[in-house]
């Protein structure tokens, strides 16, 4: 279960260009299981319409302090009491100054004074404004009162400049809010993607794994509060927020990267489609075309997952994946036993699922347990699997091997 499951999150949107990210933020908070209400300042309306935020939050957006209709339903004090978390994103320099001064002449300012919820601000502004002494002082004052400041990040800005001041991405904000998740204080090593086994300097043996499932799992573990080392084969994906990434090409390099990081880890999840064999010898020069047929000798690669599970100080939970075209349960249970795993997540490949697809479906087996996770986007599926993993790790009677 996500740490945000069932949480009541009030999102305050103030008037900056980063307000265009607010609908995505609301959507991701809801995906993580939160109930979301939105309050907009007058400035925010210059950048985004209340209707958009109403559509994604599923509730009327509140804009005015003196709103007779709202006072009959959820008034500002009730709204302040309702929230478990208040996240102001984006928080402009002006909004930060108003909160620091305790102004109560609009709905958001009043809510912030009237709430006992945790308050988070995600500043977004030009880099010179962010460095301005008044903004620094206002942030320091708010932090001294317990407000958490998230970011800002750096990079190219809407004003055309480069530097610190960009609002953190919605997924980074959600991960930060979820920080105290069920896996806080736990460390996981995850493998993802294919491996490429070289035949010569330009050719390799590989497979169709895109890395999406493994990256989604790493993101979901981080979202649940875990520290994550992601050992990634060659893929074209960006690193999920809060995840340490180690890029490798071959199975041998993947094994080395995993073994170098596995000591002291609480969990290992092998999502990678590791090549079972590699060419016995990679040619030093590009192999020339000829009319003759050619045989390539292949030698087995080490089984990283089995090696991790056989370690004397193995992680508390070792989870494998299995991609199968037939006889899913028997094949998966066979791997569970042979590799001495705690859990195995089996996916059928084909029909738009599994390898290089957006969606997947999983049958998860423990020695005495079975879960069916129906077809859905890999990001959502990964969260469900992480809920099972968290239970397995937190429960003293974890899935028996
Ligand atoms: O990357 P995507 O496009 O999102 O696709 C996701 C996926 C289909 C690749 C993923 O969901 C998946 O099923 N991964 C496992 C693929 C597989 O076929 O594994 P396997 O049956 O070869 O191996 C079983 C387990 O042993 C896996 O956890 C694998 O990581 C591990 N293994 C296998 C061989 C090896 N030499 N070392 C290993 O660690």
Image (cartoon, rainbow, N blue to C red):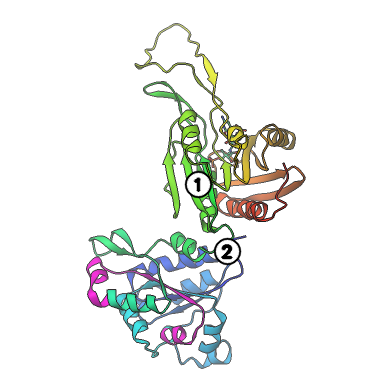
Residue at 39% x, 81% y: name it.
Answer: 41
Where does residue 38 sit, x and y in percent of width and height? 49, 76
Seen at 58% across and 88% down, the residue is 73
Q: Is mark 2 within 8 Å of ligand 1?
A: no
The numbered mark, 1 or 2, whose residue comes first in the sequence reads 2
Residue 153, given in percent of the width and then of the height, sits at: 34, 61
Q: Nearer the viewer, residue 148 or 265?
A: 265
Among the 4 quarters of the image, the one containing residue 390: bottom right
The range drawn in magenta is 109-135
Observer-nearest of 308 and 117: 308
Residue 236 shows in the view: no
Q: Which residue carries the number 1 mark?
A: 215
> Which quadrant holds the N terminus?
bottom right
Left or right position of 351 against 194: right
The vertical placement of 98 against 352, above or below, is below
Which corner quadrant of the figure contains ligand 1? top right
Residue 300 vertical placement versus 173 (above, below): above
Residue 3 disc label: 2
Which one is in front in this view, the residue at disc 1 or the one at disc 2? 2
């Amino acid at each position: 279960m996500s740490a945000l499951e069932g949480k009541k999150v009030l999102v305050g949107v103030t008037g900056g260009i980063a307000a265009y990210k607010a609908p995505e933020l609301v959507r991701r908070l809801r995906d993580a299981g939160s109930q979301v209400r939105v309050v907009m300042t007058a400035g925010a309306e210059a950048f985004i319409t209340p209707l958009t935020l109403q559509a994604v939050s599923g509730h009327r957006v509140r804009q005015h302090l003196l709103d007779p209709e709202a006072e009959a339903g959820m008034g500002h004090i009730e709204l302040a009491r309702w929230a478990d978390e208040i996240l102001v994103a984006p928080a402009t320099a002006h909004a930060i100054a108003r909160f620091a001064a305790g102004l109560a002449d609009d709905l958001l300012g009043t809510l912030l004074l009237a709430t006992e919820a945790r308050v988070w601000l995600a500043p977004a502004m030009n880099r010179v404004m962010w460095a301005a002494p008044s903004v620094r002082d206002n942030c320091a004052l708010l932090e001294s009162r317990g407000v958490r400041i998230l970011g800002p990040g750096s990079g190219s800005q809407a004003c055309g400049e480069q530097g610190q001041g960009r609002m953190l991405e919605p997924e980074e904000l959600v991960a930060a809010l979820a920080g105290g998740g069920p896996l806080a204080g736990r460390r996981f090593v995850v493998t993802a993607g294919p491996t490429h086994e070289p035949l010569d300097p330009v050719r390799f043996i590989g497979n169709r794994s895109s890395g999406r499932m493994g990256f989604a799992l790493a993101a979901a573990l981080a979202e649940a509060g875990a520290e994550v080392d992601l050992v990634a084969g060659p893929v074209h994906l960006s690193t999920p927020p809060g995840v340490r990434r180690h890029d490798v090409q071959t199975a041998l390099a993947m094994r080395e990267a995993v073994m170098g990081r596995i000591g002291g880890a609480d969990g290992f999840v092998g999502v990678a489609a590791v090549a079972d064999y590699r060419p016995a010898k990679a040619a030093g020069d590009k192999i020339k075309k000829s009319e003759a047929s050619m045989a390539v000798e292949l030698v087995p690669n080490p089984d990283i997952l089995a090696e991790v599970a056989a370690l004397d100080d193995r992680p508390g939970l070792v989870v494998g994946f299995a991609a199968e075209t037939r006889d899913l349960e028997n094949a998966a249970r066979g791997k569970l036993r042979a590799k001495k795993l705690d859990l195995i997540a089996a996916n059928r490949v084909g029909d738009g699922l599994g390898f290089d697809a957006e969606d997947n479906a999983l049958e998860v087996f423990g020695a005495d347990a079975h879960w069916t996770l129906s077809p859905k986007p890999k990001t959502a599926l990964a969260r469900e699997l992480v809920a099972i993993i968290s239970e397995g790790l937190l429960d003293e009677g974890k899935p028996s091997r």
